[in-house]
Amino acid sequence: MKSELQAVKAQLSSDKVANEAAVQELKDTVVEMERSLSVCTDDIAVMQRDIHRLTAEYNKLETKCEDLEARSRRNNVRIIGVPEGPNSSTTASVAVLLKEALSLEKEPVLDSENQEKM
């Protein structure tokens, strides 16, 4: 009976050592996971700051682009219904009409590069 108790005691001691080793391994794993999580959390914080900064910059640029487009449209004048003669260009006809209508000293210079044919 004494030998059986010693065998059980030896088995328990062996199991205890194995359990302690397993617990230590789990503790080491938890510490490693905490370090990794800390690095990931820091990376996420940096990315969130970058996203906020880029979103603000995007909104600013979008507003600026809309403003520039609006200003560009205000600087364009579309004149339609000007008859085109057989030997004259529409641009020249419009320049003469503007000179007369606005009482200008000379005909204005018109950008016919972007002129659309109607």
Image: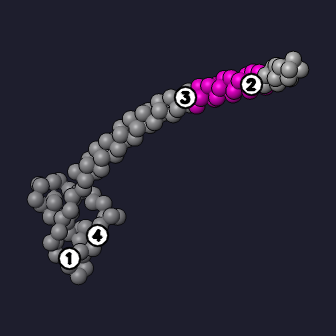
Start-end of magenta stretch: 16-41
Rendered view: 98 above or below 17: below
Q: Image quadrant of residue 107?
A: bottom left
Pointers 2 and 1 in contact (C-beta within 8 Å): no
Q: Secondary structure at mark 4?
A: loop
Q: Position of residue 34 (x, y in %)?
A: 62, 25
Residue identified by numbered label 3: 41
Q: Earlier in the sequence, mark 1 or mark 3?
A: 3
Residue 76 within the segment the image draws in magenta? no
Q: Position of residue 114 (x, y in %)?
A: 33, 64
Looking at the picture, which amino acid does disc 4 mark?
Answer: Glu
Looking at the picture, which amino acid does disc 3 mark?
Answer: Thr
Residue identified by numbered label 4: 116
Looking at the picture, which amino acid does disc 2 mark?
Answer: Asn
Please tell me which residue lies in front, 33 or 40: 33
Q: Residues within 10 Å of mark 3 (few under 14, many from 20)?
A: few
Marks 1 and 3, Cα distance to the nearest angstrom? 70 Å
Q: Nearer the viewer, mark 4 or mark 2?
A: 2
Please tell me which residue lies in front, 39 or 110: 39
Residue identified by numbered label 2: 19
Looking at the picture, which amino acid does disc 1 mark?
Answer: Glu
Pointers 3 and 2 in contact (C-beta within 8 Å): no
Specify whether residue 66 is in view: yes
Residue identified by numbered label 1: 84
